[in-house]
């Protein structure tokens, strides 16, 4: 008995010490979150000695925002050095394959649009502008010997010279009436109305600066459904291989497909590489020896898309299509080429891991990433013995790291947020699994700052969007769980059926069951959390989410009184209305088993508005007025229902925002309103 009492005393003393230590750390505020340095994708030099990356800061006064390029040694032996100082941000940066020089796209004073610049790191001085196109430059890539660059630019379909592009743009400005005229679908995308412009491929001679639109004689661009995808120089450097859709205008009644083509650098010869291939290809890469073309593709089916499958072709014959790593069954986030293998960032049960695939045998080998963090933006040096990449965790924004395959040395390079993070109380979340509907469902629980195990805390169930997404171990700015939790609430985040990273079947099982099944899993996970963690107050629970998470919040409103209050951002209320007004519609038919006028079981039984008579829970609605993914009419319908039924509710419309609340001041107000709403009822 004395031993037990002694043990309890030690345990209580340890607990009090931990609480005292945590109380010395700061609770993260919105200001802390916004103030984090934004570290971009690294690019490792061909010789493996240097890394460049972007780093910026975001301010509430957006005119003060900064983003510049930094240079650092691969081994981390020196502090990073800022090498650009322009007001505009640099993007699409890459190394010259032979020289100690870099290229990037930026919009400097006097530029009509973003232009391509070259900066010599050997000689120093100002960056040299290489292009002057009124339509700008994006996605540039350089060939192996460094004398040609290809890039894309958005132009009018028949404007194959920049002078004609300027004339057509000027002529449109002179038209006195203002009207948008459409004859094909879609008419808008995400937050923009579409026009007739297309992305075309341009090739530039690095020495002379001569630039040519190589699609001038390409018949593909003359059709109504053309859309450019991925592109790469061919191994011999005389052609460009690219993916493109020619049936984008059919998106109202099928999933458009993207095929693989090759075009000569002078634009006089275009060829479809796979004549009878049924796959839809999103990205292509060549093996270092040029013997293989790798494509990320999907078969066209009536299943909702899950991720990409990896296919290898003999090149240039495009024979022997082979699916690599077919048993991997995980979404591919990023793909890079090493001398004898391909490197993939894959999403696996909430973590983005790095794997290596032998391009001959297709064998998969784990490289980096266990049960922590997310690896992305991989860059490989010429020898293939070193990589640079971004690594982040839910409690730490992305930073730049390198890994040496020979020495197995891992080096942290940017360290841009180390000082700020050391002052904050950001404990790691706890993972737990719940059996629901016969499935193992993963959730993560986040304790509030200054956590006291002797207290009882309310529970906020945070539901992710997608649905083809997940609660990854990565830092977020739009729904940061640490800011939401503060020192007041426990957060539970559940990867319901439809989430990715758990296998293709798990992701596709949401089809025909968009809300009922996932909603039940979320409720079961919350119930399980309360059983497991005695510091949760069962009597005080709320739920909320954005996009598909907002849909689920509205479904909870329709089907349960379990929660004291709800938060729905960009959530559909009437799935039939959402079908007709969203920028994408075919996937919604697949989800519900047919068109809205077909009385399928899903349309009838899993549409929140059809259960409005059950609505009782106080709810906060937020929406961006420029959201074309879940248009504002859904939030207005939701608001009208609550007013008609006299349910406590609040509607907040952000006139300048789209599907996401991005402007810092709007974001701060949004967080404040969400937190005050939840605290009011809990």
Image (cartoon, rainbow, N blue to C red):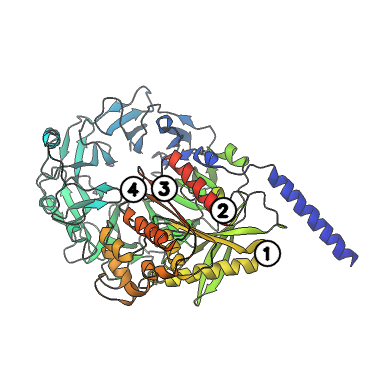
- Between disc 2 and disc 1, whose residue precedes? 1
- Between disc 3 and disc 1, whose residue precedes? 3
Which of labels 2 and 1 is toward the front?
2
Residue 103 point in image, percent of width and height: 32, 34
Q: Residue at x 54, y 49 (%)?
A: 676
Which of labels 2 and 3 is toward the front?
2
| Residue toward you, 671 or 400 | 671
- Between disc 2 and disc 3, whose residue precedes? 3
Mark 3–mark 1 contact, CB under 8 Å? no
Mark identifier at residue 534: 1
Q: Quadrant of residue 388?
A: top left
User: Mark 4 = which residue?
Assistant: 625
User: Mark 3 = which residue?
Assistant: 377
- Between disc 1 and disc 4, whose residue precedes? 1
Measure the alpha-carbon separation of dots 2 and 4: 26 Å
Measure the alpha-carbon separation of dots 1 and 4: 42 Å
Residue 394 point in image, percent of width and height: 53, 51
Mark identifier at residue 680: 2
Question: Mark 3: which secondary structure?
Answer: strand
Question: Mark 4: which secondary structure?
Answer: loop
């Amino acid at each position: 008995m004395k031993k037990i009492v002694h043990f309890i005393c030690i345990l209580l003393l340890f607990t009090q010490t931990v609480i005292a230590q945590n109380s010395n750390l700061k609770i993260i505020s919105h200001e802390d979150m916004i103030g984090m340095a934004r570290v971009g994708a690294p690019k490792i030099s061909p010789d493996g000695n240097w890394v460049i990356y972007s780093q910026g800061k975001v301010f509430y006064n957006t005119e003060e925002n900064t983003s510049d390029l930094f240079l650092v040694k691969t081994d981390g032996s020196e502090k990073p050095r800022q090498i650009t100082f322009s007001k505009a941000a640099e993007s699409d940066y890459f190394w010259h394959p032979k020289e100690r020089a870099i290229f990037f796209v930026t919009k400097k004073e006097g530029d009509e649009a973003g232009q391509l610049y070259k900066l010599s790191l050997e000689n120093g001085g100002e960056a040299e502008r290489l292009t002057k196109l009124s339509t700008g430059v994006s996605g540039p890539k350089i060939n192996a010997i460094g004398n040609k660059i290809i890039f894309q630019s958005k132009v009018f379909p028949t404007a194959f010279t920049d002078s004609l592009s300027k004339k057509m743009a000027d002529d449109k400005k002179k038209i006195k009436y203002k009207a948008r005229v459409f004859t094909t679908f879609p008419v808008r995308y995400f937050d923009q109305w579409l026009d007739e412009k297309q992305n075309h491929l341009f090739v530039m001679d690095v020495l002379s600066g001569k630039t040519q639109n190589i699609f001038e004689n390409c018949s593909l661009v003359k059709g109504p459904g053309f859309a450019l995808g991925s592109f790469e120089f061919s191994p011999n450097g005389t052609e460009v291989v690219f993916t493109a859709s020619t049936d984008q205008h059919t998106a109202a009644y099928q999933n458009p497909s993207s095929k693989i083509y090759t075009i000569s650098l002078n634009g006089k010869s275009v060829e479809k590489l796979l004549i009878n291939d049924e796959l839809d290809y999103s990205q292509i890469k060549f093996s270092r020896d040029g013997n293989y073309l790798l494509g990320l593709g999907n078969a066209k089916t009536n299943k909702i898309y899950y991720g990409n499958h990896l296919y290898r072709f003999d090149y240039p014959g495009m024979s022997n299509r082979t699916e690599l790593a077919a048993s991997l069954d995980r979404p591919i986030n990023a793909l890079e080429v090493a001398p004898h293998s391909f490197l993939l960032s894959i999403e696996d049960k909430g973590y983005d891991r790095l794997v290596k695939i032998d391009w001959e045998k297709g064998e998969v080998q784990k490289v980096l990433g266990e049960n922590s963090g997310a690896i992305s933006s991989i860059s490989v040096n010429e020898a293939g013995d070193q990589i640079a990449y971004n690594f982040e965790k839910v409690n730490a924004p992305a930073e730049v790291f390198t890994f040496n395959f020979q020495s197995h040395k891992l080096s942290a390079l940017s360290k841009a947020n180390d000082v700020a993070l050391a002052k904050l109380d950001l404990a790691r979340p706890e993972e737990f699994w719940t059996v629901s509907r016969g499935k193992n469902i993963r959730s993560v629980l986040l304790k509030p700052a200054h956590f006291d195990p002797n207290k009882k805390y309310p529970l906020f169930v945070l539901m992710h969007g997608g649905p083809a997404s997940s609660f990854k171990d990565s830092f977020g700015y739009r729904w940061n769980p640490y800011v939401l939790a503060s020192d007041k609430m426990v957060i539970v985040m559940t990867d319901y059926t439809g989430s990715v990273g758990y296998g293709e079947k798990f992701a596709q099982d949401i089809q025909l069951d968009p809300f009922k099944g996932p909603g039940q899993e979320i409720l079961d996970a919350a119930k399980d959390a309360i059983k497991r963690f005695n510091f949760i107050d069962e009597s005080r629970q709320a739920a909320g989410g954005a996009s598909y998470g907002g849909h689920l919040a509205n479904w909870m409103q329709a089907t349960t009184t379990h929660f004291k209050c709800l938060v729905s951002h960009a959530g559909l209320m009437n799935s039939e209305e959402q079908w007709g007004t969203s920028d994408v519609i075919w996937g919604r038919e697949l989800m519900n088993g047919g068109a809205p006028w077909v009385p399928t079981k899903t349309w009838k039984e899993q549409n929140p508005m059809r259960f409005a008579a059950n609505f009782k829970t106080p709810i906060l609605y937020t929406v961006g007025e420029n959201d074309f993914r879940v248009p504002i009419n859904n939030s207005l319908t939701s608001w009208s229902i609550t007013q008609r039924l006299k349910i406590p509710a609040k509607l907040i419309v952000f006139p300048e925002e789209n599907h996401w609340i991005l402007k810092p001041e709007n974001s701060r107000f949004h967080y404040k309103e969400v937190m005050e709403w939840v605290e009011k009822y809990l």
